[in-house]
Image (cartoon, grey):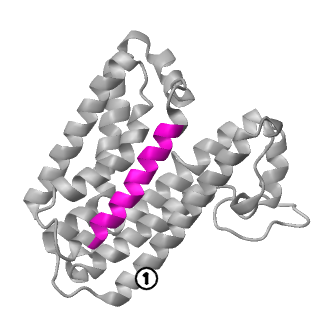
Amino acid sequence: MDNVFLLAAAVIACQMVFLWLLSIPLRNVSIVDIGWGLGFVFVAWLATPKANGPPVMLYSLVTVWGGRLAWYLWLRNHGKPEDYRYVAMREKHGSSFVWSSLLRVFALQGVIMWVIALPIMATGAEAISEPCWILTGCGGVLWMTGMFFEVVGDWQLASFKSNVDNQGKVMDSGLWKYTRHPNYFGEFLIWWGHWLVSLALTDPSKTWWTIVSPALMTFLLLKVSGVALLEQALKQRSPEYTSYVERTSRFFPRRPRVNPSVED
């Protein structure tokens, strides 16, 4: 098992160094976001010793998720300036930003990626021949529901933004009527789905501890780089967002409040 985790670390390190080197002439650190989903795909197929049999079930799910996310982010970011988060970091660190970005952006994301990829690595190292189909089914339902929220939510938002009449307005229809972050909610479901499928393909008594993966992803989505960071920026950009916050669930989907009073 140790070899799997070390090999995965090496694969992730190579990817992050490559992206860092590429970001220097491009002067655009945002490419790390495009590489995020692909990193898990590389771990699944390059760092695990059993890229066949039952593990292929999980690897395929990860590949569909990671490939779609990378393609979506590339289409969204292609030809656009560097993300405002990285622009702020570049201005703060000045001439030292090149080296600072290696540690603060690429190395940090690499470490987080390694932790979140634990179920993928454990599946390759501890795969069994007879999967638990109950856990597989539960994980699959979570994954498919999560993909629905991600794909449909992203599509609805892109369509909304493509209409010039919506410039400066807040998206509050479709899935966005029931949760302010359907794409992040989908991501949450997908990673809990990955974990359940991983348990189904291994001996849970040996791999239960990989729960740190979906738990960390949940924490990041809710408290760090997902919902919290985005909402802080949106509240500053649009006064209309305040009323949207008052009537719409922050994360878990529910019907909008008719008489909003308390933000959740």
* Quarter of the rendering occupied by the C terminus: bottom right
Callout 1, which amino acid? Cys
Q: Where is mark 1, residue-wise?
A: 138
Q: Quadrant of residue 126?
A: bottom left
Q: Image height check: is 93 above or below 256?
A: above
**Residue 175 drawn at (x, y percent):** 69, 62
Question: Residue at 29% across / 78% down in the picture?
Answer: 199
**Residue 31 drawn at (x, y percent):** 40, 33
Furthest-right residue in this view:
259
As for residue 202 lying within the magenta part, the answer is no
Magenta stretch bounds = 57-75
Question: Residue at 71% across / 41% down in the picture?
Answer: 161
Q: Image height check: is 188 above or below 145?
A: above
Question: Residue at 23% across / 44% down in the picture?
Answer: 12
Residue 20 can be seen, yes or no: yes
**Residue 252 drawn at (x, y percent):** 64, 67
Question: Residue at 29% across / 36% down in the picture?
Answer: 107
